[in-house]
Image: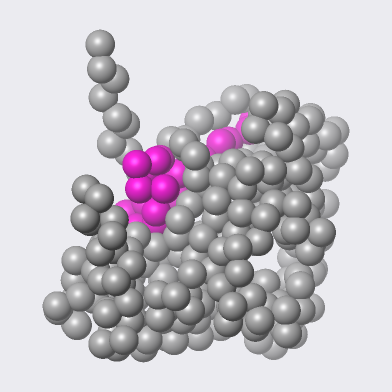
Amino acid sequence: MTQTPDPSPLRVSRDADIVRIALNRPARGNALTPELLTAFCAALEDAQDARAVVVTGEGRAFSSGGDIREFHSRADDVDALERFGDAIVSSLNRAILALRALPCPTVAAVNGPVTGGAIGLMLACDITLMCRDAFIQPYYARMGFAPDGGWTALLPERIGTARTASWLALDTRVSAVAAFEMGLADRLADASNFTAELDSILATLALHDPAVTATSRRLLDARRGPEALADCLDRERAAFRQLLVRPETRSRMAAFLAPREAAG
């Protein structure tokens, strides 16, 4: 009997006081859409009483970022394309800020590749467990998009401004091991041991006061001074919208999708 795919863009489960939120578009690499991100924010709102929140992806990917097919389907209508781009980045920004505001520890269980703005869901978490088979890649220079998802708002404080700039310019694919060495992952695990390693992290968190993690996060975020994270993310949104509608970007989207469409 063939199993019908779950149409929900998220799979949310609760085990006692642990909430697990899985992006659930595996056939599209868990690509982000406004609907998925709106559901994600609603799931976080429902998790305010959790002791820990885990964010992961169904299937082989964590998330491929924005859905290029969704963008390209609007390429002939500049106004519609601009509105869609604004909606998805605005929704992603809300998701990042909601993760940063949770009163409990958050764990990014990065089970597979992370590309584009999906890195924001990883960077916003307190702890990152990354599968050794995973990788991170911007794809912005290739597509003609401006970086979003915290590539300029969150990443530079982790790895430095110059390193962030070169990564974006060269569109380098960074392995999980390299990400660990850069300080972007806290732990690595083989695919066969990934669930056990995640359970180990959650068992450790269960021994500790979740308010300390939330308070520490708030104090660290306050080091930004008068310029809030929301302002930095909003600048990314404005830049994304501006570059998205250029003929250059629309041409690059078509070139990116052409071999995939030909392959069916």
Q: Is residue 141 above or below residue 257?
A: below
In the picture, residue 70 is in which quadrant?
Answer: bottom left
Left or right: 82, with 42 as reference point = left
Rendered image quadrant of residue 231: bottom right
Query: How far across and down, in percent of the image, does residue 257 sit?
Result: 29, 63
Is residue 108 visible from the viewing direction of this image?
yes
* Screen quadrant of the N terminus: top left
**Horizontal side of residue 73 vs 105, given as left or right:** left
Q: Residue at x 14, y 78 (%)?
A: 76
Residue, x 26% and y 24% (percent of image)? 4
Q: Please provide percent x and percent y for residue 229.
A: 62, 76
Q: Nearer the viewer, residue 194 or 260?
A: 260
Q: Residue at x 66, y 81 (%)?
A: 166
Q: Is residue 41 magenta?
A: yes
Vertical side of 51 occupied by 248: above or below: below
Task: State yes or no: residue 199 in magenta.
Answer: no
Read off the magenta span: 17-46
Q: Residue furthest left?
A: 76
Please provide percent x and percent y for residue 193: 71, 28
Asked if 41 appears above or below 132 in the picture, the reply is below
Viewer can see residue 214: no
